[in-house]
Image: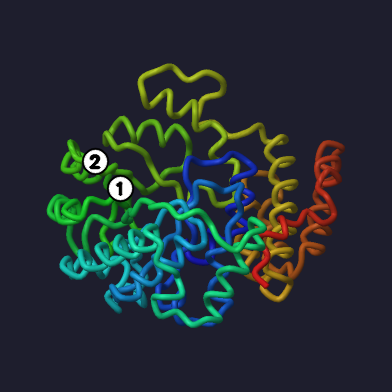
């Protein structure tokens, strides 16, 4: 999710209850290959997030070929092509969900990305695909910051696609059949058309039909849409017979969302889950302790990674944390004006009146910064 699933958020999620796989914000292949250096900040990641997949969008196969080299050179565990973004600016340009209207171009893009992965794994230097030397040096610097070495072992990584049910009508059976011709490792289907944006309920029956089309192939079919709890995860897997689900908005303000994933997996497979019911929330008091502590940690991670100037981007996350407890609305009204982690700490302190809450805030280090490997300098 653009502007949401940045490196700070993903790191907090990984530390609170690691998902099976994590995707970056979607990033333009043009920005990767030709844009200013700061745009590569969306491809910063931590080793703690693995497996982590770079999510790209665009409409130029040649740029996908180049960008695939960059993704591999940075050491990602997979490359995902976004064919599902409904944003007017993205889709109207022919990228994102706009590719549903140009299936032949979608094929070209998938082939170009796969060829880029294959050529890189076979030894082709990233400098040989037309990138400027400064961009090559930046990629190496990002690797050094993350892992201490400028290069990564050469290996082939899987190619996947994220898409929707259709453009202005549901054409999922035909569209999935078309995508399967290129044999992606995974196809993720959001249960709405582009025209629906995020309105109405996700159509999991249509996702189930997509899963049946993909059945018997080597491509995994994953569903997405309206997942708000691990109970939803188990129910949707059983209902639609998908191989997994993607969680997006359901994890906003609740980075610990994935803690019960093993119980959900067991329930989806027909076993009885043990422990708390998967749909239940934490105890209200415990939930406040958790929210306040993690919210402050998240703010400090973001500030250490992106700097104080970009802190306003953190405000939406702060707002999402402020829900489900007494006076949450008043706290949210203050949080969405915060300009630094110090502001967040002061606001949290004003609401941390009980001993457990005060202790939770005190447990967060004053400078809970991410590893130096996350720096984008």
Is 369 positioned to the left or the right of 148 in the image?
right
Quadrant hosting residue 99? bottom left
Is 48 positioned to the left or the right of 250 in the image?
right
Dot 2 or dot 1, earlier in sequence:
1
Crowding at label 2, few (<14), some or many (≥20) Cα neighbours within 10 Å? few
- Residue 311 versus residue 356 in the image, above or below: below
Helix, strand or loop under label 1: loop
Q: Specify the label residue 185 is tagged with.
A: 1
- Residue 217 versus residue 5 in the image, above or below: above
Q: Nearer the viewer, residue 37 or 239?
A: 37
- Residue 182 locus on image (x, y percent): 20, 55
- Residue 266 locus on image (x, y percent): 43, 23
Is 30 positioned to the left or the right of 178 in the image?
right
Say which residue appears at 46% left-offset and 75% top-offset. Answer: 127
Say which residue appears at 74% left-offset and 53% top-offset. Answer: 296
- Residue 281 versus residue 162 in the image, above or below: above
Q: Residue placed farthest to the front in the image?
A: 123
Task: Report the quarter where the C terminus lies.
Answer: bottom right
Q: Are marks 2 and 1 in contact (CB under 8 Å)?
A: yes
User: How is this picture coloured?
Assistant: rainbow
Spatial CA distance of label 2 from label 1 is 7 Å
Crowding at label 1, few (<14), some or many (≥20) Cα neighbours within 10 Å? some
Q: Specify the label residue 24 is tagged with.
A: none
Say which residue appears at 56% left-offset and 41% top-offset. Answer: 18
- Residue 12 locus on image (x, y percent): 64, 49
Q: Specify the label residue 218 is tagged with.
A: 2
Q: Nearer the viewer, residue 34 or 349?
A: 34
- Residue 70 locus on image (x, y percent): 46, 67
- Residue 142 versus residue 13 in the image, above or below: below
Q: Is residue 195 visible?
A: no
């Amino acid at each position: 999710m653009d502007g949401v699933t940045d490196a700070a958020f993903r790191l907090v999620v990984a530390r609170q209850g690691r998902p099976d796989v994590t995707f970056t914000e979607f990033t333009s292949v043009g920005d990767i290959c030709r844009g200013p250096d700061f745009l590569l900040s969306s491809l910063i990641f931590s080793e703690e997030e693995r497996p982590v997949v770079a999510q790209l969008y665009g409409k130029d196969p040649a740029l996908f070929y180049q960008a695939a080299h960059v993704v591999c050179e940075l050491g990602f565990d997979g490359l995902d092509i976004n064919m599902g973004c409904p944003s007017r600016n993205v889709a109207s340009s022919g990228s994102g969900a706009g590719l549903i209207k140009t299936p032949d171009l979608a094929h070209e893009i998938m082939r170009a990305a796969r060829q880029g992965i294959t050529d890189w794994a076979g030894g082709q230097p990233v400098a040989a695909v037309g990138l400027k030397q400064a961009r090559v040096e930046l990629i190496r610097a990002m690797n050094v910051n993350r892992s201490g070495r400028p290069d990564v072992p050469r290996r082939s990584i899987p190619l996947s696609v994220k898409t929707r049910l259709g453009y202005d009508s549901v054409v999922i059976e035909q569209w999935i059949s078309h995508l399967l011709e290129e044999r992606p490792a995974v196809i993720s289907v959001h249960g709405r058309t582009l025209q629906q944006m995020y309105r109405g309920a996700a159509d999991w029956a249509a996702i189930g039909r997509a899963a049946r089309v993909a059945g018997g192939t080597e491509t995994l079919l994953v569903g997405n849409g309206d997942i708000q709890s691990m109970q939803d995860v188990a129910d949707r897997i059983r209902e639609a017979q998908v191989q997994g689900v993607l969680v997006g908005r359901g994890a906003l303000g609740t980075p610990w969302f994935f803690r019960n994933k093993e119980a959900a997996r067991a329930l989806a497979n027909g076993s009885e889950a043990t422990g708390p019911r998967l749909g239940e929330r934490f105890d209200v008091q415990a939930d406040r302790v958790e929210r306040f502590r993690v919210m402050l940690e998240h703010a400090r991670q973001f500030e250490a990674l992106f700097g104080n100037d970009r802190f306003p981007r953190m405000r939406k996350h702060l707002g999402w944390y402020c829900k489900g407890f007494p006076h949450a609305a008043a706290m949210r009204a203050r949080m969405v004006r915060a300009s630094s982690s110090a502001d967040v700490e002061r606001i949290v302190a004003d609401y941390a009146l009980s001993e457990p809450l005060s202790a939770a805030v005190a447990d967060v280090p004053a400078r809970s910064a991410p590893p130096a490997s996350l720096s984008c300098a």
